[in-house]
Amino acid sequence: MASKKSDFLRNKIEPFTVEAGAPAEEILRKMERISFQGRNLAIAHQVWKKMLADNVLIFLGTAGALSAGGLRLLIAHLIEFRYIDCLVSTGANLYHDLHETRGHHHFLGSPEIDDGLLQTEHIDRVYDTFVDEDEFIENDEWIGAFAQTLDPRAHTSREFLHLLGRQLWNETGRNGILTSAYRSNVPIFCPAIADSSIGMGLSQARQHNDDHGYLDVIGDIAESANLVIERRPTASIVLGGGTPKNFINQAGVQAEFYSPGGEGHRYAVQIVTDVPQFGGASGSSLSEAKSWGKLSVDGDHVTVNADVTLALPLLVSALSASAAPLLKARRPPKFDLAGRAISLDGRLLPLDRYISR
Amino acid sequence: MASKKSDFLRNKIEPFTVEAGAPAEEILRKMERISFQGRNLAIAHQVWKKMLADNVLIFLGTAGALSAGGLRLLIAHLIEFRYIDCLVSTGANLYHDLHETRGHHHFLGSPEIDDGLLQTEHIDRVYDTFVDEDEFIENDEWIGAFAQTLDPRAHTSREFLHLLGRQLWNETGRNGILTSAYRSNVPIFCPAIADSSIGMGLSQARQHNDDHGYLDVIGDIAESANLVIERRPTASIVLGGGTPKNFINQAGVQAEFYSPGGEGHRYAVQIVTDVPQFGGASGSSLSEAKSWGKLSVDGDHVTVNADVTLALPLLVSALSASAAPLLKARRPPKFDLAGRAISLDGRLLPLDRYISR
Amino acid sequence: MASKKSDFLRNKIEPFTVEAGAPAEEILRKMERISFQGRNLAIAHQVWKKMLADNVLIFLGTAGALSAGGLRLLIAHLIEFRYIDCLVSTGANLYHDLHETRGHHHFLGSPEIDDGLLQTEHIDRVYDTFVDEDEFIENDEWIGAFAQTLDPRAHTSREFLHLLGRQLWNETGRNGILTSAYRSNVPIFCPAIADSSIGMGLSQARQHNDDHGYLDVIGDIAESANLVIERRPTASIVLGGGTPKNFINQAGVQAEFYSPGGEGHRYAVQIVTDVPQFGGASGSSLSEAKSWGKLSVDGDHVTVNADVTLALPLLVSALSASAAPLLKARRPPKFDLAGRAISLDGRLLPLDRYISR
Amino acid sequence: MASKKSDFLRNKIEPFTVEAGAPAEEILRKMERISFQGRNLAIAHQVWKKMLADNVLIFLGTAGALSAGGLRLLIAHLIEFRYIDCLVSTGANLYHDLHETRGHHHFLGSPEIDDGLLQTEHIDRVYDTFVDEDEFIENDEWIGAFAQTLDPRAHTSREFLHLLGRQLWNETGRNGILTSAYRSNVPIFCPAIADSSIGMGLSQARQHNDDHGYLDVIGDIAESANLVIERRPTASIVLGGGTPKNFINQAGVQAEFYSPGGEGHRYAVQIVTDVPQFGGASGSSLSEAKSWGKLSVDGDHVTVNADVTLALPLLVSALSASAAPLLKARRPPKFDLAGRAISLDGRLLPLDRYISR
């Protein structure tokens, strides 16, 4: 009969062995049997596959300079092939995506540079990444001009971003986060849009024409919660923490208030560099989220403490092979985003009222 | 004649010596001559005093669970005695402040706890801090009810939070962040209010009455930039990073676009646990901010890498003695916040148009 | 009858209030009722006082550039007034202490500097701290010359460092870590002395005279464990992690092997910037240490995640007032360190054999 | 003529694109054109290849729980195929390697566990990794017994570890770090061996027989510097920081003192989770190392801020394909380690005297 001790010591670490030419999915498969954050990334791979196999609505949150940092086509890939169903993003990641979709670029640089010189040269720095400030100013004006073409009423960030993606696609025909989401009918929420250059562009629209440049971010709250009520169970994938992390969790909590009976997000993966010890939301543990009812008590949850630029390329490269059959079999939620309110699987979701289920 | 080498080796470290009963300002004064983050906190003390001595408008940004964590009266003190002139906050810090002002509490707890049990008991956890979830639900409803008493139009977060502070003061007569700001006529911006329980309360107002529960967060952008245009030079104190950090910087950048000739924030202090290496805005260096024109190239800037709950009590305790004469001599910007738009030193700041200077 | 929920919600956070001129102990007393790392530092203050009130042998571990960073006189103070009984240190902290005791200095600098220029100028940098490399070279030679004056046999690091402290005191009469430990008969262990400039100096002694420059670091292992066996219970204060953290714990584990019946260190405080998630020993949790028997299961243990240069000045300033009566009443272990082996409370501790108790 | 601005903006970020079945080297190749730590890992891949192409002696430092964490066969692979020439390790990594080579295991566990229960069950925890404490005790005794079979004199850690590897190979015939190093004649230094269970085992040898259990760690200092003097230029790869990081750098500095004309390590890669801001050596920047002359001013140097368990599997998987021709062409330094002193390319390196070149 097994003693307690042997129960604890049942699953052996299998040291990682090297194989020339190994593909990503093989590397991650071996990492399941090692320790620390290497193991956690391998578990994230497995949990994401469970999300895809189960019939859940998958939220993706993106914070940190992921687009400027070179991950925008990878995120567009996740959208296009429906590894995820709804994006919640900081404004910066959408703005930097727009920047490249409009034909501009970010550049490789060095963090050890004279920033005063960069200021003189109109170059903006994000750690080791550089951008032409004059192009940014032109983007802002383009956003302001576009906003003036819309109906003179407040839009949710979700509606505005769908229309923005449509405009970008029509103008450029280029792939990116906003354009892929537009073409794939995947909604994007941006709760902190007022803290971004997109918001600045909108304020410039209003400068020119005070009928324009209004957003309805409270409508975003109701709409996101209604997604949960309408299409439980749900899952959360968080890259970098920030406002998207809480907004995704808030949707579940708000849904539960008006339409009890959910369980919190059934699956959760987060890849963050912050840690819980300082009390901030970005680094908070997934266990803590259970106390709030944000996550299900018994679900599959894993935190990977890593820079997203290092972890995500390996993770999605692996998924692109290992999850292919799951993606093929998957029946994701079907959105119609052309109107003022979202239609989900044929049912219109109100902006100003919570659904009862 | 001094050689290059001796130039580098001019300022000796003076090892910290211990003195029984030493007050905070004496401890920080000695820390100026040691290294690493201890020195940086001491420099922050000096830079803050320079802000107070110079005729600048001082922004304070608060992110992370500062109110829940026990710092709300300390921040209220900064507001009341005008160590700062304008607050930019996450929604959570204002909500947790409201929670206590309404007579509820946060509680000491342990991070090593069964979160499933907490969920059952309706207790929400923030690392080692606990709160009664049922009281939170009641707060949300109170906010929703209050919002229904306002004019049926969109409010900037700034206007809404001033009215919320007034209501709280009238109901409770208790000191806190919102009530102190109300009484001291210090504006509060909350650009990511849609990502908070205050936003959730507003959505509940709309649930009941769809004329209410609208915010104008783009108006906040214009108004905050106009503060800078009207009352340069400016300074930035950032606790914890997050949306307030960028919003404060964005105000300066937007101001420069419409009314060139500023320099970026002349002084800057940030106390953050994030680091720059992962590209996120919370951890970004103040040097990097110069490249964007967010900070002046030659100003006094210092980053303290520390948990705010550990660093701020010592810092503000020291300031309360060392800065007393500066506070007395200071002539801070004078706001009138009763109307839809801010009046600053007698001049009304438009919400939908940038001032020209 | 109290429900479970109210049990969890019994101890209210009391928001920190500001008082001009408040002394360190008052600031820390108030920080006991706030959250996160601020609270943890306040608990560390209380746990240290418990160590002093209880009849325990207190180990202090010092890693990171504490001496170069300006904390050497503070550590000397802890030694002289017997806040602690035995020091375990990295070589660098002792070497940098020797540097200043010999009349040299460390200097304030900037981390944003051309390091190639510093190399040309013979200036060595530790983040924002500079030192004259030529003075370091002269120190190494002084250590080498001193080592040649000793008996031509291997010394434990403990014996060698006591003799080094004696020599420094006789030459300089200056206060510091090594000289205070010499004068107070407090033993210092340096398990990784081969990874330091002190080790380099010893290798230069051997270069000149191959009868000298030998150390017996295995003897340090036996001697440190015998301290525990002879004078249980014990306590551990760790600043910065590193080799001292494990060496202090190892002493307890080794003691238990030869003389069972201990409990692990009864009290433990660590102030570290590392976190547990990456598996390294510096960041490992004190809970984890219980599994190894390094710490008692029921003892008082607290981790403070903070830079030591920021946390220790406040902590020791507070203790210097709050712990004064405890220090006066304390009867610390009494060492005689003049011989090859330690005498503790009159009993000689073997270097090559574990005591049986 | 190119303006300054366009110089800064010459190298475009190329967003990462996903390809099913992509091998590791392809993933890393694409990561060269993104930002932050993803880019740094890709640069590390390139710098390591430069080390292999150039005729340099390559040091590898290993700290943190890499062996317990499942990376020991990967490190053995680096040794066996001479991606590296000399290992400097913490004692723990060698001890945990010995543990598995002797047929024991580490186990997958959870960091959220009752550590008091683990103590009762004699299970030791390293974050999410478990081990049988009784097997550890038996290892210690095996080391103690082995040490008693050696000549009754002090051994350098380098000599002792070579003999230990030989014994392990003869007993078990199993692959691992110690056995691969033995079979490949790759030297291993362990400067902090007194802070490890190997040191504890040696102290137990002395307990039984006081002619045994002596180490000569100062001899390690001279020998490691002589490696540099004899076989410049050199390179440094550091995993996790700790004592190996400084010991590898110290060897170069000490070499320069006795035999000037070197340049510091020409190439350097470090993968660490620590950051520079707190002044500790583990997190110190490679730029700072230039000021000390530890690294060449113009060499290729890169820091990757990441958990080794996450970064190294991808990195070495890529190298195993991309570096194969370089490994084949490489003529690594040839060691004979059978004697008391190292023979390098046919020349005996003294333990107690620095070579003049």
Image (cartoon, coloured by chain):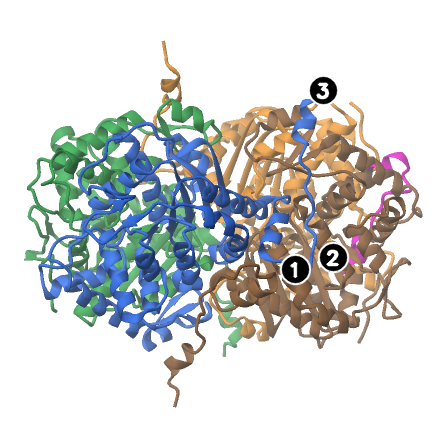
Chain colours: A brown, B orange, C green, D blue
Label 3 residue SS:
loop
Label 1 residue SS:
helix
Residue of label 2: A77
Query: Measured from the top left, where is residue C352 in percent x and y?
Result: 11, 59
Q: Quadrant of the C terminus of chain D?
A: top left
User: Contact, CB < 8 Å: mark 3 with mark 1?
Assistant: no
Label 1 and label 2: CA atoms lie apart by: 9 Å
Label 3 and label 2: CA atoms lie apart by: 39 Å
B310, C231: nearer the viewer: C231
Residue of label 3: D1
Q: Chain of mark 1?
A: A
Left or right? Give the position of B47 relative to C22: right
Query: Measured from the top left, where is residue C211 in percent x and y?
Result: 9, 41
Q: Could you confirm whether marks 3 and 1 are on the same chain?
A: no
Q: Chain of mark 3?
A: D
Query: Measured from the top left, where is residue B93 in percent x and y?
Result: 62, 51
User: Contact, CB < 8 Å: mark 1 with mark 2?
Assistant: yes
Residue C22 visible here: yes
Left or right? Give the position of D157 relative to C14: left
Looking at the rendering, the stretch of residues picked out in magenta corresponds to A204-221
In the drawing, what numbered circle is on residue A316? Answer: 1
Residue at the spot x=57%, y=53% of the render? B65
Question: Which residue is at the far top?
Answer: B1
Query: Measured from the top left, where is residue A208 in percent x and y?
Result: 89, 34
C289, D31: nearer the viewer: D31
